[in-house]
Image (cartoon, helix red, strand yellow):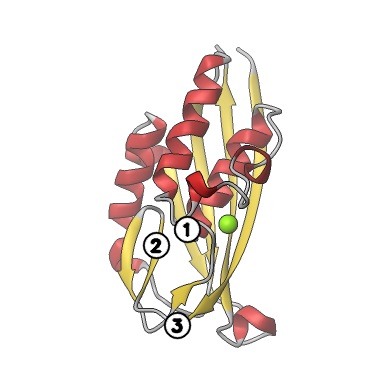
Amino acid sequence: MNFRTGTGYDVHAFTAGDHVMLGGVRIAHDKGIRAHSDGDVIIHALCDALLGAAGLGDIGQHFPDTDARWRGADSRALLVEVVRMLAQRGWRTINADVTLIAEAPRIGAHRAAMRQVLSETLGVEAAAVNIKATTQEGLGAIGRGEGIAAQAVALITAG
Ligand code: MG
């Protein structure tokens, strides 16, 4: 079997708003995300991990923020497109592991829903998509609550 791994990282600043999109799930919050798309850092990091594993560059190359098509886009549509690009080349996902880095919102109550959305989109069982979260312990911009970030790693195979 042929295996590849890739990593992804994304960060977005908060702005005025009443919700954030994380892992394809809408979560009520006292701030929103400043972004060209819906600013879903979990999906963006996951897309980059998958693109990286397949040697296909990064999310900015495929979905440029100068392209009106992706303005306000539901990031699940980006992930669907990334999965399609990989499938075209014979790649399928084995598993993915994501870490959200944020002081807030807390995602414990939404974790199962995120796993469901992401695993269905990737075509894997829910157990193959792990969502972790940590705070920045009050340090730096994320610690001050100015934004949120996510890291992801994915394993793909062409076997
Ligand atoms: Mg992003």
Residue found at x 37% / y 53%: 24
Which corner quadrant of the image does residue 29 belong to? bottom left
Q: Position of residue 66 (x, y in %)?
A: 63, 51
Local SS, label 3? loop
Ligand 1: does it lie within 8 Å of the C-beta at label 1?
Answer: yes
Q: Are marks 1 and 2 in contact (CB under 8 Å)?
A: yes
Q: Position of residue 156 (x, y in %)?
A: 57, 27
Q: Is residue 18 above or below residue 122?
A: below
Which residue was labeled with disc 1? 40
Local SS, label 1? loop
Residue found at x 55% / y 23%: 86
- Res 138 visible: yes
Nearest to N terminus: mark 2 or mark 3: 3
Comparing labels 2 and 3, the label whose residue is closer to the camera: 3
Label 1 amino acid?
Asp
Query: In the picture, which quadrant includes the C terminus?
Result: top right
Q: Could you give the CA–CA distance between mark 3 and mark 1, rounded to whole angstroms?
A: 16 Å
Which corner quadrant of the image does residue 47 belong to? top right
Residue found at x 47% / y 39%: 79
Label 2 amino acid?
Met
Which residue was labeled with disc 3? 16
Label 3 amino acid?
Ala
Q: Is residue 155 above or below residue 159?
A: below
Local SS, label 2? strand
Ligand 1 lies in quarter: bottom right
Q: Position of residue 103 (x, y in %)?
A: 51, 80
Which residue was labeled with disc 2? 21
